Structures are given as C-alpha cells and as structure tokens.
Amino acid sequence: MPVKRCGPAAVLENKPLGDGIFRMTVRWTEPVQAGQFFMVRGWDRFPLLSRPISVHDAAEETLVFLYEVRGEGTQLLSEKRKGDSVELTGPVGTGFPVEKLKGKIAVVSGGIGIAPLLLAVKGLSGCEVTLCCGFRDKSYALDDFRPYVREIRVATDSGREGKKGFVTELTDPAEFDAVITCGPEPMMEKLARACIEKGVPCYVSMERHMACGIGACLGCTHHTAQGAKCICKDGPVFKGEDIYA
Amino acid sequence: MLKTVLNGVTMKNPVIAASGTFGFGQEYDQYFDISQLGGVSSKGLTLEERFGNEGERVYETPSGLINSIGLQNPGVDAFIRDDLPFLRKKDTAVIANLGGSTVESYLEGVQKLGETDVDIIELNISCPNVKHGGMALGIRCDIAYEAVKKVRAVCKKPLMVKLSPNAQDIVEMARCCEEAGADSLSLVNTFQAMAIDVYKRKPVFQNVFAGLSGPAILPIALRMVYQVCGAVKIPVVGMGGISSWQDAAAFLMAGATAVQVGTANFVKPDICLDIIRGLEQFLKDQGCRSVSDIIGAARV
C-alpha cells in the first residue's frame, strides 16, 4: 500500500536569515523523523532534478526547511513567497535514532549541516545536549535551539563569533555518551574517528549527489562496513564506524 | 482502451517503467500501486552481483542526466530469489533486463531467467558504463547479430533487444537483431556523453564517458525510433526522455507499440500514472477506440 506521497505543499513563509540562508515553512501533515529529508522542487521542468533538503523542524501541520542558496535549484526555492507552492516527495531516508540515545549528547554541526539537527535535538528529550556548531563567519538559527540545549559552543572560520577555528576543536567525545553530527565530510570524518578511538557512539548524516532520493537510481551508493548502501534510503544517517572504520 | 499486446504478453497499457530507473519496483510501490503500470523492466541484471562504478555516478545537465552507475545489481540468482516474487505479486508485466560482459554470461543468465515466470527478457546490449561489456556489442552489427542469435537459441521467453543510440547505424543494427531472432526491440538506451569539472581540471566520471538520458535526448531518440519502426516488422518499444503523455503519444505515433519511461521517474515517482491517465484522456478526446489507433499515426 502506498504510504508516502509526492505532491504540492503550500509555502507559508520563506524568510531570509542573511548570507544566503533561508528558512521555508510549508504546510504538511504527515509524520516526519529527525534526519529525514524531502526531494523538493519549486519549478516545472528546469532544472531537471528535485533537490534533497533536510527537515529542520516539524509540527503537526507544518514542516520547516533551513537551506543555503548554492545553485539554480536553491536560488529558485529562495524566490518562493507565501501563497506559492513547492512539490515535495517524501519524507525519505533513515534519520537519527534519537529515541535510543541517553545521557550527555554532543550535537555537532558544520555550516548548513545544522539544518537537520533542530528536530534531532527536540527528540533528545531527557538528554543533556551540548550543541557545538561551526560557521564560516556568523551564526544563524541558534535561537531555535536554545530551549532544548544545555550549552551552545560556537566556532567560526573568521573568528567573528565564538572561537576562531574548527568546531571539532570544541568537541571532545570523551565528555559525551554519544555524538550526532552533520556537516562537511572532513569535519565529520575527524569527529567520527575521534569517537571510534574513544568508544563513543557517533551518528553521521551524509550528503551525496543523487537523482531520485528514494533508492532507485543508485547514484549515491556508498561502500560501508555493512556493504553497499544508498545514502538516500539506507542513510543519510549512518553509524560513524560503518562509514569511517 | 490502452490495452496493449507485446510479444504475446497482454499489458493493461503501453507504459513500462524503464530499466535502471525503477529498481525492482519496491521503492515506487510506496508512492503508488505499481500494478497500474503496463510493465516494469528490472534494474539491469548480470550473472554475478556487481557493486558498480566508483566515484561520481550522477551529474545533472540542462534537461538531462548523465549517469555512470555501472550496472550495480544483486545478480540474477538474488533477483530471482529476493525481488521477482514481489514483482510477480503485482498485476503488471515483468521484464527482466539482462546485461553481461561475455556471450557466455548472457547465455547462462538467459537460461536461469527462462526457468522463472518473467514475461519478457530484455537483452541489454547497450550499457555504456561497463568496460568491455555491452558497448562493443551495441555498436557493431556483426557482433550483435552473433550474440542475439546464440541467446535466441536458448531463450525460452520472448526476447526484446535493447539498442544503443551509439550504434554505428541504428537502422542496420535493428535489422540485424531482427534477423538474428529478436522478438521485439527497445530503444534508445543512453547516449555516450561526458562532463568535466573545470575546477579540478578532470572528467567528472572515473570512466570518463557516461550515459546521457532525460528530456534532452528526446528528439534524437524519437527520430531513431521512427527510423527503426520503418525498417523492421517486429514490435518496437520506444524510449528516450519521455516525461509527459504528449511525449509518450509522439513515440506511439512514430510507430512504437509501447513506451518506456526512465529518468522522469526520478523527478516524480508517480509520473507514469500521469502519463497513463493523460494518454487515456487524449484517446477519448480524439474519439479513438484503442491505443492502436494512434500507433504509427504520424508516419509519412
């Protein structure tokens, strides 16, 4: 029986947060898990492919995407206004196992990798969450996290905010019972390897070019310790040791 | 109204999900009941399991998609054991797409599939992404003729041969395959193409060349289907960039008995349903009694 859907969703808000970052709220009523994403398009035929955009936040009747304008597709999304609609396929993918995690959790982001982590943090109720986030120059979206985290540590490349340097320098896995992360791969690899070394469970959210987003095109197949996996369907969230061991 | 008979197999409509774009149907069945399709052509199978190609595998172009998947698949045996039962439970024609690297491996694969209840075997002699396999077979008529003839001799199912647009002469290739015993032809597979990463000063794909599909190829694919339909007597299944009912109707009017929809499945998982419904409405509006009324209708 069909359980997923593809179809239009009404745009309720599409707010610029500066530096090419936008927060789009759409109407959506079906359940979504932290770490899942949608294939999104807001145009007819060009560009050809929809864009994989992770779920930033979800409520009973709304869904929020936090995204960075990087190319033609995200540029077109950024031009959407209240009353327009976008086409969504999903939700797709396997997200963060937030309900299984306990104790002190580090939630670590690099750049727009912070997007899927808000819903994850909201799902970590009962955990003591530390958000460690890296940005190029300026932070964004942090106010939404504050009610759910004990501490926020910020690093920036420019040093304009927080500590100048890499977010990995703010995150010692030994302090935590588990780590979840999304960001550039070199950052996630460094963090995941540190976690593996210290025996701390780590979950990474991967990104790849993909055509379909539902596990059919096999364009995002990745070698893992568990064999060939689709980043889109079997992931995007994997255990760190399955990717980097 | 849309009922179509292809090589003795009755399909509820002429719309088939193309190989390599539809997995084995399970993913799409989460979006719509795939029993509504005329048929499903399986992901390209090889005798042995294959991981496929390393490096980048997909690259978007203006109205197109270049892929270098490299026939990632679980192998014929695993398909028969794990995936065919699901497809068979669905009320849709099941086409097993078979690739290979040697004639021997094709023969063994065809024999294994011949013992199952698949409806049609689609022989892929046209995958551009497997080194030393498929491609030469798809380009040279004499090599294709020999291979198809040997496969035909052991094949217990209707044999559809999938042609490459990269063939030296697509019409000659079609005639050769017909003469070698093919029961039907499907065309076109992807066009050999490439992309270059200008920042890295390197080809995007590890194999350098890869296969272009999507709306960008439609007009050329349509021309080839039109030419082939005029040259052979066996049924032709047309494909190449179809993403609307109008596109599908154009291939049927060029002379194709049925169509396959490929890359468009990636864009909208239930696009085939839009195409089926659109075709049905069009036929009604045109006062047609059956889809056969438009097959070849645009031939001059």
Image (cartoon, grey):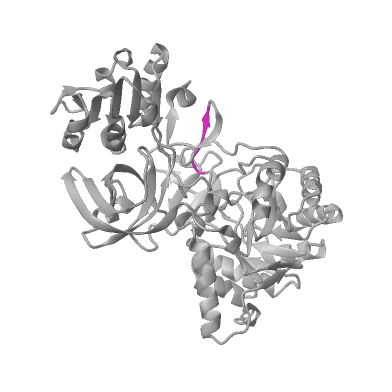
Instruction: Judge from the rendering whether residue A91 lies leftward or rightward of residue B242; answer left or right.
Output: left
Is residue B227 in view from this perspective? yes
User: What secondary structure prevails in the magenta region?
Assistant: strand
The image position of residue B192, as x and y in percent, is: 57, 53
The image position of residue B266, as x and y in percent, is: 48, 54
Q: Quadrant of residue B68?
A: top right
Of B86 and B44, which appears nearest the observer? Answer: B86
Residue at 78% of width from left, 62% of height from top?
B182
Of B60 and B119, which appears nearest the observer? Answer: B119
Q: Is residue A43 above or below residue B105?
A: below
Of B199 and B69, which appears nearest the observer? Answer: B69
Residue at the limit of the structure toward the left, as seen here: A160
Instruction: Judge from the rendering whether residue B269 lies leftward or rightward of residue B84; answer left or right.
Output: left
The image position of residue B83, as x and y in percent, is: 65, 46
Residue at 43% of width from left, 39% of height from top?
A208
Disc count in the image? Answer: 0
Residue at 67% of width from left, 72% of height from top?
B4
Q: In which quarter of the image is residue B164?
A: bottom right
Find the magenta span and give its range.
A219-224
Is residue B242 in view from this perspective? no
Of B159 and B220, which appears nearest the observer? Answer: B159
